[in-house]
Amino acid sequence: MKNLKKIICAYTFVLFGFASPVLAGSADFAGIYAAVHASFNGASVSGTHSGGSTVDSNEVTQGNIGAFAPIGGWEAGFSLPLGETFFVSAGTKRVSGAARLGDWRTTPSTSASETQTTEANRSESLTLTVSDPHEWYIQPSVSLFDNSAIFLKYGRVYADLTAKGTVTGAPANLKGDTYAIGTTTISSNGIFIKTEAGASVYENMSIVGIGGNTNARVEGDPMVAYGSVSV
C-alpha cells in the first residue's frame, strides 16, 4: 500500500511539475461525459481466522482466498479545465457484476501447537462474494496533445459483501479507496477511449460464527486489482 502511494506521488510530480503550456488541449476535454466500460478484476482477501479450534479458542490461523472476474458497467462525469494543459474530472463509476471468492482455507500460524495445527488445517465452508461496486472519484489530468491526456485518479468505492456456508454472522458491506492511472483519447467525432489500471483497497472486514462456532471470527483485508477500457 505504501509503495502504491509512492508511485502515485512520483507520477504526480512528473506529470504536473513538468507539464508544458506548449502542449495545449485541456479545453478539448471540457464538459459532461458518459461511457460504458469493461474490466478484468482480480479480487483477494487475506486475513486471520480466530476462535475456530475446539482445542483452543484463542487459536489464530491465517488464510487467503481470491478470484478473477470480467465485469462491465458505466460511468459519467464532468471535466473542468484549470489551465492550458491541466484539467480535473469528477464523476461516478458503476459496475454490474460480482467476483465470487472460494472457500476460506486456513493455514496454521507460526505459534500454533501440533494439536492446533490439526484443527487449523480444516477447510471451513465459507464463500464470500463481492458485488455491484460503485465509486465516486476525482481525476486530475494533463493534456499531452490536442486529443490525448494522462491522468491519476483517487476514488471512494463501496461494494456489497455476502457470505454463504457454515456461517451465522453477516458481514458489513465494503468501503475503501481506489487508486489508478490511465489515459484518455478523444476522436474527431467526440468519442473518447479511456484506459485505466488500478486497485481498490477496502477497509477491514469481519465475519463471526464461522463453522457454526459463535466465537469463531474471520477478519481480512479485501483488495481488487483491475484493468478497464471505457468508450
Image (cartoon, rainbow, N blue to C red):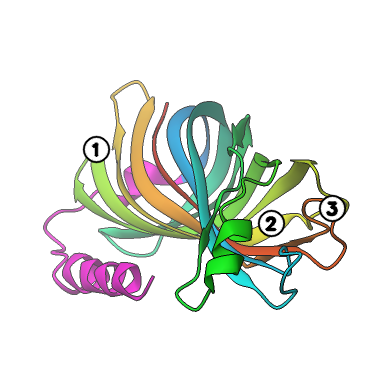
Kindly check if marks 1 and 2 are in contact, taking CB atoms under 8 A apart as contact. no
Q: Residue at x 38, y 51 (%)?
A: 198
Count of numbered badges drawn on the protein: 3
Q: Residue at x 71, y 74 (%)?
A: 56
Dot label at residue 147: 1
* Residue 24 horizontal/vertical position (percent): 20, 53
**Secondary element type, mark 3:** loop
Residue type at mark 2 is: Leu
195 vs 58, left or right, is: left
**First-in-chain label (3 vs 1):** 1
Give me the C-alpha separation between circle 1 and circle 2: 37 Å
Dot label at residue 170: 3
Give me the C-alpha separation between circle 3 and circle 1: 48 Å
Give residue 29's quadrant in the image.
top left
1 vs 20, left or right, is: right
Q: Is residue 177 above or below residue 104?
A: below
Dot label at residue 174: 2
- Report crowding for label 1: few under 14, some 14 to 19, many 20 or more residues within 10 A (C-alpha): some
> Is any atom of residue 156 visible in this view?
no
Q: Residue furthest front?
A: 115
